């Protein structure tokens, strides 16, 4: 899971770097071309040395652009095929793993769907990682509360378009977030620390979206936060397993 988490961070950071650096690299090449033309016109005594240096810079710029293209092509690759799994089992295993690890004195409570009506196309390890990230954030939020409470539930509902979906809700009774802090939950990166809240939520969002779902947050009327992973209910069509 640690390896997968690092992969998620690297993948998302690669997308950002590839997007942001493409234009400057292109501009560098354009400026270098202009300098070469000026050197040809002015014919300075040290033109040979300058031309050699410019040639090296141009070569390095092309190398960097080639590397970014490889990163972009890697990021665009399809994920691994999904398996038809039970959301209850995945979430319950994530809860049990956290509780047994005793990372917090607060025990996470779980309530799931009745019966076996919780099928989703999923990568088990990825979804466990997403749920555990949300649970760790919730446990951290209630760490200073007098009566801390963290719970996770799995239930069925319909999307705004009427399609059936599975909702995995992680709720806590931590302090109420300010408007600014609440808005940051939807930003790409809201933390500069490698183990910070922002990167963790970025990984969760990346995993959920790769599963065809959405990650949403809701504030309690007085305090607390609820994070919900919405995933499409499986239609048991093998073609939807990617």
Image: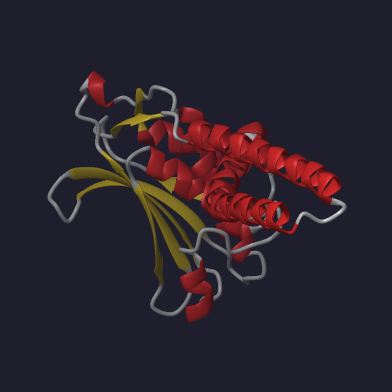
Give the image's coloring scheme.
secondary structure
Q: Residue furthest top?
A: 238
| 222 vs 204: above or below | below
Tell me residue 40's x, y (percent). 70, 51
Tell me residue 47's x, y (percent). 81, 50
In screen coordinates, is 170 left or right of 29?
left
Q: Nearer the viewer, residue 39 or 113?
A: 39
Q: Tell me if residue 126 can be seen.
A: yes
Tell me residue 207's x, y (percent). 46, 41
Figure quadrant of the C terminus: top left
Tell me residue 25's x, y (percent). 61, 50
Picture residue at 74% right of the left edge, 41% below the top: 55
Q: Nearer the viewer, residue 106 or 50?
A: 50
Q: Nearer the viewer, residue 137 or 145?
A: 137
In screen coordinates, is 28 left or right of 177?
right
Q: Tell me if residue 135 can be seen.
A: no
Figure quadrant of the N terminus: top right
Q: What count of labels does the image hold?
A: 0
Q: Nearer the viewer, residue 197 or 102?
A: 197
Picture residue at 87% right of the left edge, 53% below the top: 45
Q: Quadrant of residue 226?
A: bottom left
Picture residue at 49% right of the left edge, 63% below the top: 187
| 126 vs 177: above or below | above
Q: Residue furthest left?
A: 162
Q: Quadrant of residue 211?
A: top left
| 110 vs 172: above or below | above
């Amino acid at each position: 899971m640690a390896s997968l988490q690092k992969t998620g961070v690297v993948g998302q950071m690669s997308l950002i770097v590839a997007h942001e650096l493409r234009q400057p690299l292109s501009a560098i090449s354009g400026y270098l071309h202009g300098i070469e033309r000026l050197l040809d016109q002015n014919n300075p005594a040290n033109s040979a040395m300058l031309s050699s240096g410019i040639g090296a810079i141009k070569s390095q710029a092309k190398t960097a652009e080639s590397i970014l293209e490889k990163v972009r092509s890697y990021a665009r690759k399809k994920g691994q095929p999904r398996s038809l799994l039970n959301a209850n089992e995945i979430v319950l295993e994530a809860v049990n793993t956290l509780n047994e690890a005793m990372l917090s004195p607060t025990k996470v409570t779980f309530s799931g769907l009745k019966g076996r009506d919780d099928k989703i196309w999923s990568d088990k390890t990825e979804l466990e990682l997403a749920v555990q990230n949300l649970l760790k954030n919730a446990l951290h939020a209630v760490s200073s509360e007098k009566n801390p409470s963290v719970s996770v539930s799995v239930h069925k509902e319909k999307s705004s378009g009427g399609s059936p979906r599975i909702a995995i809700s992680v709720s806590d009774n931590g302090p109420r977030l300010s408007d600014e802090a609440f808005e940051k939950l939807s930003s790409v990166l809201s933390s500069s620390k490698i183990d910070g809240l922002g990167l963790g939520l970025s990984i969760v969002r990346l995993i959920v979206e790769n599963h065809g779902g959405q990650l949403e947050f809701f504030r309690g009327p007085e305090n607390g936060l609820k994070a919900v992973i919405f995933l499409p209910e499986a239609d048991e069509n093998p073609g939807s397993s990617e």
